[in-house]
Image (spheres, coloured by chain):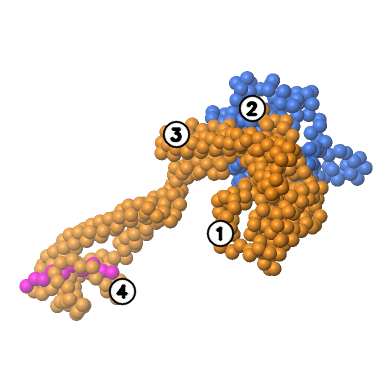
Chain colours: A blue, B orange
Amino acid sequence: MDNQADNPIELPFSAKYDRSHAEQYYNKHRDGLARRLSNWRDMQLARRALSIAGDPTLVLDLPCGAGRFWPVLAEHPGRVIVAADNSADMLEVARATQAPEIVARVRTMQTSAFAIDLPAESVDSIFCMRLLHHIGESENRLAMLREFHRVSRDSVILSLWVDGNYMAWKRKRLEARRNTAGRKSYQNRFVLPARLVEREFADAGFRVAARLDFLPLHSMWRVYVLNKI
Amino acid sequence: MLAKHSLQRRIVAAFVLMSAVVSGLFALAMIVTMDLTERNLATELMQQQLEFVLELENVGTRLELGPNTRYVSDRDPAWSDWLNGFQDGFHDAYEQGNEVHVFLHTRADGRHALLATLDEFERREEIMERLALVGFFASIAVALGLGLLIANRVIAPVIRLSRQVRRREQLLSLAPPLATDYADDEVGRLAAAFDEALARLRSALDRERLFTSDLSHEIRTPLMVIASSCELVRARGTLDPGLDRQLERIERAVIEMRELTDTLLRLAREPSPGEVVESTGLREAAQQQFERWQPEAARRQLDLKLHGEAGAQRYPAALLHTVMSNLLRNALHYTEQGFVAIELRPEGFSIVDSGAGIPAHERDKVFAPFVRGDATRGDGVGIGLSLVQRICARQGWRIELRSPASGGCEFRIDLGTDNASSRNLHESPTSV
């Protein structure tokens, strides 16, 4: 038997999302003014991206995490939301913490982003926030993008860390200093060169429809809207 | 209507054209009105001036006119001959390249003329004309911008709808209806029409799937009866040796039919949860098929060969067997002499034969259902290759028909390494 489905790609970062971590995750985006502001900006970008993607009516939120984007996704009254995460704990926390009227509109499923348990072209759009920056290997990213290409009918919205901005430069400098100090730290988040990742999008069969920066030239977060070619 | 341009471009063009016509007419009217007014005013003014000048002349004084106006009569030496060419009244004329207004009057004592050079006036007129021109182009630019904006607004729902309908062949029942997302206008009705058509398509597909699976189920039982009866007959041993061969043929046909119905069943429905689908290696399957078709090849005096090395990957057994056996049956059927070979590769296999080959123009049709090669050869309804193609499409295997230089043809199957094939081995339902 093909071992791909037996052993789908498992990355170490995904092991940390147990129950307590999941709850922390939910709270993380709720305290402090700066957090609230950044959360607001995240939602704004998500809204813009969804609108550019043509207001898809059947969206797969993968990974949905604590359901942070469900309220934005549910703003469209006719939208069917399928939320998926690799961690069952996460899904449980999401269902428990989000408002009941929103939870009622969301169908949840546990699946890996590398082998989504859905037939080909079964959703209008895949909404993938804050996952790609955890994936350091180009090969793994391509595997995931190809899987997205299979499952999505029209578009993919994803966010990641890109270079070419102040924060990326600062991070690089910090890392260089750490490395010279001899303290090799475990990294589970990666800044990707925008040109490289855009070539990967093209390789997986996507066209970039929009690039939305969290704070242009300053922040590393960028949201991409991709259309299937 | 044959629309060569996009809807958006046509809307913009209509906007620009309309504004060009309107503002063009406007500018033209402005220039004509200005011209007429100028003429009327100048005529009146110059007539009065000339009358005044002549009156003063009568009393013996000559009036000092302004720097731009002068008076001449045909008795003066200053009289220019070109003035003779004009009749009495007001005229626009050119004197040494400059525009002048001329007013002529004939009296008993000769002809009198008042000439006014128009430097100042002309400058203003020029400014007005330029303004009209600028206004014309500005209004076209505004129309272009406005047209683009409005066209985008108007067409946005159409574009969105077309994106939503694109690649909707999956027809997932989960997808919400399209029409609820649009206003109840032309686009909304279009969306509703799509919904209806898609729903009909979906139900037709469901019916087809049900029909195929029911039929396959129903056929299984009589097949079992035939197979067990054959066994029984053979066990009794009451057959005369001549009928033994017939019995063998019946048994072979039953096996083939069972495989066919199994395959159809598999294609018709998604595997149920937890169902373990039998899997096989490529080498194993090829060996089995090789042994199975060996007698048939021998009967046709063809050389059946098996070579090459396969990879260790495993595939759904029934589907792989169906693909191989259909291709082999096809190759044996259409090959007069020579060989049929199964060539294994790590990621797939080829069935090569030394037959007549397939003419280029028929190659595309080969995979269509119920299309057969040379019709005189009979046997089968031509469902084999179309089935092969359906299986390949479903499993994500790539099939290609080639014509080797040595003649004959080669069906090349790439099983690939992607997980589409393994997905179907243990597809689990979603909680969706």
Find the distance from the CA under tag 2 to the CA under tag 3.
Answer: 27 Å
Whether callout 1 and callout 3 share a subunit is answered yes
Q: In the drawing, does residue B233 fall left or right of residue B5?
A: right
All told, the count of numbered labels is 4
Whether callout 2 and callout 1 share a subunit is answered no
Q: Which residues are magenta?
A: B99-108
Task: Write the residue at 74% across / 54% down.
Answer: B294
Say what amino acid the circle numbered 1 marks. Answer: Thr
Label 2 lies in what chain?
A: A
Mark closer to the chain start, 4 or 3:
4
Q: Would you say the magenta stretch is mainly helix, strand or loop?
A: strand
Observer-nearest residue: B156 or B52?
B156
Which of the numbered marks, if any, corresponds to residue B81? none
Task: Write the residue at 88% across / 42% down.
Answer: A178
Find the distance from the CA under tag 2 to the CA under tag 1.
Answer: 57 Å
Say what amino acid the circle numbered 3 marks. Answer: Ala
Query: Which tag is nearer the camera, tag 4 or tag 2?
Result: 2
Mark closer to the chain start, 1 or 4:
4
